[in-house]
Image: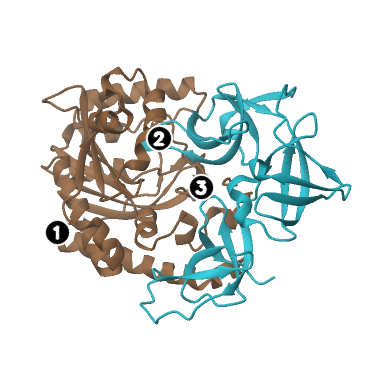
Chain colours: A brown, B cyan
Amino acid sequence: MSWERLKDPLLQQRLKARSRIIALVREFFVKEGFLEVETPVVVASAGQEPYLNPFKTEFFDERGRRAPGYLITSPEYSHKKLLAAGFEKTFEITRAFRSGEEWGGLHNPEFTMIEWYRAHADYTAIMSDVEKMVQFVAARVSPEQSKRVAGSWERVSVAEAFKRYAEVILENVPDEETFFKIFLTKIERKLGVAKPTILYDYPTSMASLARIKKSDPRYAERFEVYIAGMELGNAFSELNDAKEQRTRFMKERALRKNLGKGQIPLDEDFLDAVGNMPPSAGIAFGIDRLVMLLTNAKTIEDVLAFPAGELWGLPKSRG
Amino acid sequence: MLIVVANLFATLITSTTMARANEISRGLILNYKNEPHLIVDFQHVNPGKGSAFVRSRLKALKTGKVVENTFKSDETVEFVEMERIKVQYLYGTPTEFTFMNMKNYEQFSVGLEVIGDYAKFLKEGLEVTILVDEAEVPITVDFPKKVTLKVTDAPDGVRGDTSGNVTKEVGLENGLTVRAPMFIKEGDMLVINTDTGEYVERASQE
């Protein structure tokens, strides 16, 4: 744990590349007509996801009146409110915070994410955005990585990936635990190796905030981006049915309770906005992991000036 | 001098403790499919906002076969207690490796079935842990994830781009060769990952 770690010339090189990468990402979206917005990092109602652990905080006003708050695990809720209000193309490069995950490897409790949203579009438009953005940035930063992300990316459905890499019929997978065990052991590392992979159409049970596919209700219009076995982004055709969203929230709250986790207040304003949103699509994409990819970094700490381990000095969880 | 004939695995009476998969740590032994396995590597993963899992690489003690398995973080696993002896590497041949027990200074040798692929990372004075069974027979080595080795041969690289992507092959003090960044020169101390054989970073001068 020491500031002297910053003297490493290779780390310094990567931090300079990081700065160029973020500037290029921003340039891409501005050029494409997206509006850069800033949404709160401290909110009254965090996401309901049963397996995410938001940082809890508290603040008080000038009269000492206290209010509990949370650090965002994603700026999604605010962006959907913007979509409902008529903002058609927004993006934000911001920090997200998740407790209870590994320090190092692919995670840092505080990390940098970009989210962008398109009104009157579906997830296929976002697929095209990701391809173009990564290619735009890679071409200007790393000739080596540029070759790797060039051309048309592989598009594989989740069902197809299970068949091809695990020889399993997706419909026969009984629960989420089995899904992930198979996915993590046999499939994930094979994705995005020769060229990036867009893994699309997740089972409805794993829809998260995505819309169910009208042409096949077994699946939700959700995709993830994999490059070199690493997940870089998670995208949806956004659910814009307030009733369905409330039902999903209730299920998540029940699961949170079963897991012995605290209840997080429901964002009623968000639920209202969801009902007023046009059909839209959006994505959450990891900037730190993009920098890792483009600078050949092996762990997220290699692209952070001050990874959590340096600040708290806990033993690194990876051997 | 105690020369051990390894691989007498016979009846292994060991004590076990139940714990959660997210307590997995490198070098521990756990029972996987009823066979003791050394945890070679692990990673905590939180896939797509899903629940937490631990991805692991396990080496079967009996056969040396490496398997990958993903546990749910709160899944129960059975850790096997084995006696761990801290030793220091002295010298060796390609098939026999002599260590000194750092508690009682006794010397003993083990074969490739204990050291396996880690043999190429050994250097004089390196401290490792040998796991022995109830009969004091060495079964396997708990090798450090990283070793520091001195560069003995570093050709001058061609001046290429400074993007950090360009590497050259360098020779290390124990005969191992590795690809390292262009700025590495003879005398530098390099940190090497013993799972992949890859350069990690230049060791800080201490």
Q: Which residue is drawn at 69% across and 55% down?
A: B93
Type of amino acid at the residue the image marks with label 3: Arg
Local packing at callout 1 (Cα closer than 10 Å; few below 14, some 14-19, many 20+) is few
**Residue A263 placed where, x, y %?**
46, 27
Q: Is mark 2 on a helix, strand or loop?
A: helix
Q: Mark 1 points at which residue?
A: A33
Q: Which residue is drawn at 56% across and 47% down?
A: A318
Please say if the residues under marks 2 and 3 sit with CB atoms less than 8 Å apart: no
Type of amino acid at the residue the image marks with label 1: Gly
Type of amino acid at the residue the image marks with label 2: Leu
**Residue A250 placed where, x, y %?**
35, 22
Hey, which residue is sitting farthest right in the picture? Answer: B104
Residue A258 appears left or right of A48: right
Q: Mark 2 points at which residue?
A: A184
Residue A118 appears left or right of A77: left
Residue toward you, B188 or A86? B188
Residue depth check, mark 2 versus mark 1: number of the one nearer the observer: 2
Local packing at callout 3 (Cα closer than 10 Å; few below 14, some 14-19, many 20+) is few
